[in-house]
Image (cartoon, rainbow, N blue to C red):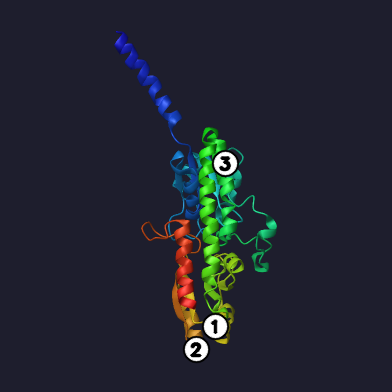
Amino acid sequence: MRSQLFVTILSIFLPLFSAAAEPPRVVATTSIVADLVRNVGGDLVQLTSLMGPGIDPHLYRATPSDLEALRSADLILYSGLHLEGKMQDIFDKLSRSKNVAAVTSNLPREQLRTPPEFEGNFDPHVWFDVQLWSQCAAVVRDKLSELLPSAHSTFQQRHDEYVSRLIKLHQDIKQRIQTIPAARRLLITAHDAFGYFGRAYGLEVVGLQGISTATEYGLRDVSRVVDIIVSSKVPAIFVESSVSRKFVTAIQEGVAARGHSVVVGGELYSDALGAEGSGADNYIGTIEHNVRVIVEALS
């Protein structure tokens, strides 16, 4: 009788203990934000990333399953600065009852780019300045520590180790870009995502589209880029993993009509990480891939 009673009590309370031991549920929007959470949180959190490889966050709309994941999350982390433009209303509504934070929220505003064509908003592509992106890890550390105060020292240690790796990467990039001849340090891509990269590492950056891929390019934009390529004798342009490649044909035809030629230097990862197993399926691997492609094509 006592044995049966013990089994009954155990069956009632064991699920409660298991639920208490379950890692907190963290939802990240982009694969780049998710990678930041993964490096600081590790296996102490249950991480869900809404946007996979090759997904353009500028145009992304939340699916029903995304909304369910957001509603059941203990913490929601997004990039911010209007990168996930079509989801901002969702974040605003959820923030009234949930822990929601942009990882860029504490960045000094004087360090952010304010392109005039972006209607007074900041350029959201801050991860292309590795040193600037490293500052976003502190928001992740602090928010995870609020969820699991007992693990604060672990989050702090992981934060410090990861930031050290990022600062080393930042210095390595500076040295590698300097190997490109000065006259060839001109980076032409589909949209203006690499402004922070150019500012941090000494490249002039030209995008066919504006900051957001939601902005369509026209004949005037094509003509502008063609003029730059021809006048500067640019050897290569670059496609992006999360942006349509249809612009390449228009640029190459325009350049050819002016008696010049330009090749595709390779594919760069802009608004999303690469697929699993690509070597660019984490932030550091993505940045290293981009630097390698750029240096090889422009040197």
Q: CA distance from mark 2 to mark 3?
A: 53 Å
Question: Which amino acid does the dot numbered 1 rest on?
Answer: Ile
Whether the residues at callouts 2 and 3 have beta carbons within 8 Å, the answer is no
Check disc 3: other Cα within 10 Å, few if <14, some if 14-19, many if 20+.
many
Question: Would residue 221 be seen by someone viewing this image from the given angle?
Answer: yes
Q: Which mark is residue 260?
A: 2
Among the two numbered marks 1 and 3 on one chain, the one whose residue lies closer to the N terminus: 3
Q: Which mark is residue 143?
A: 3
> Residue 222 location in percent, x, y?
55, 79
Q: Which mark is residue 229?
A: 1
Q: Quadrant of residue 113?
A: bottom right
> Residue 160 location in percent, x, y?
54, 47
Q: Which quadrant does the N terminus fall into?
A: top left
What residue is at 58 percent from the left and 51 percent from the top?
A: 136
Among the two numbered marks 2 and 3 on one chain, the one whose residue lies closer to the N terminus: 3
SS label for mark 1: helix
What residue is at 43 percent from the left and 41 percent from the top?
A: 43
> Residue 49 location in percent, x, y?
46, 49
